[in-house]
Image: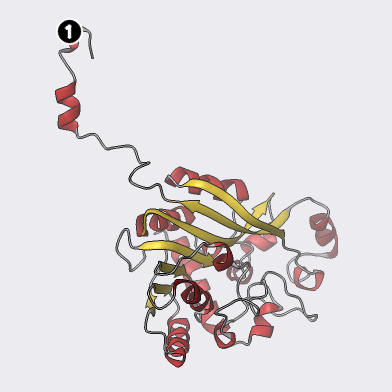
Amino acid sequence: MTSKEQELKDIVKERYAKIAEQGKAENASSCCGATTPSNKVYNIMMDDYSETDGYVEDADLGLGCGLPTTFAQIKTGDTVIDLGSGAGNDCFVARHETGAEGKVIGIDFTPIMIEKARTNAEKLGYNNVEFREGDIDNMPVNANVADVIVSNCVLNLVPNKQKVIAEIFRVLKPGGHFSISDVVLVGDLPDALKQDAEMYAGCVAGAIQKSDYLQHIKDQGFANITLQKEKPIVIPDDILSKYLSEEERNNFNQSGVGIFSVTVYAEKPSAKTQKPKIKLSELQNACCDPQSGCC
């Protein structure tokens, strides 16, 4: 890990420790909870969970940008992993789908979030939901464990997204799949937004181009990549004014640069669809004398 990547991780960890103590309304009216709330009530990124089966209000910190569990095709008995599990809301929704027969593992690198999530699980009496402290780019989980992986507005906070995607591939069972909500860009953000550490922790400056995001998933070897949902994110002027002058805001709003919340689905190929690995000895035995021209 580079020093810059570690610095960004430390920024996010520190900020999200503070966010854990904020209320949902305060988080929802800001940019993923990280910036000073707007003086108007804005629901900038999050979707409403309140009508979702398994929803737990005490576990909803208003930090998401989608409803990945709605699209995740979780079945009874599945093992589900939630990346960046926060206070546990998506885990509890997933638990409703997988039932007592399944297992749900939440991973978060902020100790206070882990503590809040475990407290919520204990109150609910959920013995098949556990929370593990760790980085999602180095998951404290063995390979080929999960049937389904979900995540809600978290990968964009991680500097090395390719490493996280590789970890997702490692941890999923062959034939397993993920459904992840995240923030992506179309076009380049103004430098002031990119460089501001607080905005980084607020999701937007950590986002990458949508085309690059999807390409990383493809390059890792995932199949059936599907954009399940996409919605534009509009940052209000009273938040943008922290970073941009009036002229810069006008130029930005007319630039065609887009900030989007997307929910992406993809599958890890099953053993049946993966190409068989040929051992070097088998390849050598199959190859006849090069002088005969048959190799």
Say whether residue 263 is left or right of residue 218. right
Above or below, 284 against 272 in this view is above
Quarter of the image that includes the N terminus: bottom left
> Who's the residue at 45% across and 63% down the image?
149
Above or below, 273 against 290 in this view is below
- Residue 294 visible in the snapshot: yes
Say whether residue 236 is left or right of residue 221. right
Above or below, 111 against 236 in this view is below
> Who's the residue at 69% across and 84% down the image?
25
Q: Residue 94: horizontal and vertical position, in percent?
A: 49, 72
Q: Residue 163: horizontal and vertical position, in percent?
A: 42, 55
Say whether residue 110 is left or right of residue 271. right
Mark 1, other Cα within 10 Å: few <14 / some 14–19 / many ≥20:
few
Report the residue marked by disc 1.
291
Q: Residue 290: horizontal and vertical position, in percent?
A: 19, 12
> Given the image, on which type of amino acid does mark 1 rest?
Gln
Q: Residue 183: horizontal and vertical position, in percent?
A: 62, 61
Quarter of the image that includes the C terminus: top left
